[in-house]
Image: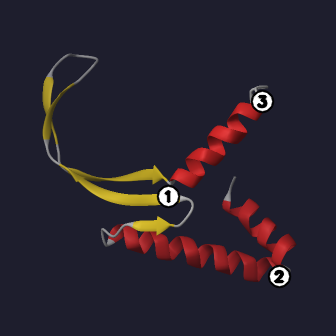
Amino acid sequence: MTKADLVEIIFEKVGLSKKEAQNIVETIFDTIKESFVEGESVKLSGFGTFNVRQKRSRRGRNPKTGAELEITPRKVLTFRASNQLKEMIEKNGAKSLGER
């Protein structure tokens, strides 16, 4: 699914113009991105939680050469699905695999 798909769904279900639907989708994503930049978590009830986590520096190895190197500290974005979403995926995933 893409942003364009979301715009199309809002256009069809809500009845807003495509331009208005696009503005809403862009505003939502811009707000979420700003929260990530500020290091805030984003919790979407019934969907899941996005967290920005700080990772420490650590030693790594170049898989091609085997040479050791220092991996610099960085921030990573993690996602934890809500129990409702996990249950929905499990329930519908079994159907798609032909299990009932």
Left-right relation of 100 to 43 = right
Q: Which residue is mark 3?
A: 100
Q: State which tag comes first along the sequence, 2 or 1.
A: 2
Residue at image x 47%, y 71%? 32
Mark 1 secondary-structure assignment: strand
Residue 29 placement (x, y as % from top left) = 55, 70
Query: Marks 2 and 3: which is nearer the front?
Result: 3
Q: Is residue 54 above or below residue 61?
A: below
Residue 46 placement (x, y as % from top left) = 57, 62
> Which labelled disc corresponds to residue 1?
none
Q: Which residue is mark 2?
A: 17
Is 37 or 12 nearer to us in this picture? 12
CA–CA distance in space, label 2 to label 3: 40 Å
Residue 5 placement (x, y as % from top left) = 75, 60
The three-letter code of the residue at mark 3 reads Arg
The three-letter code of the residue at mark 2 reads Ser
**Dot 2: few (<14), some (14–19), or many (≥20) neighbours within 10 Å?**
some
Q: Which residue is mark 1?
A: 48
Q: Quadrant of residue 25?
A: bottom right
Q: Pick the quarter of the image with the C terminus.
A: top right
Residue at image x 50%, y 58%? 48
Q: Is residue 82 above or below residue 8?
A: above
Residue at image x 59%, y 51%? 85
The three-letter code of the residue at mark 1 reads Gly
Q: State which tag comes first along the sequence, 2 or 3.
A: 2
**Dot 1: few (<14), some (14–19), or many (≥20) neighbours within 10 Å?**
some
Left-right relation of 39 to 25 = left
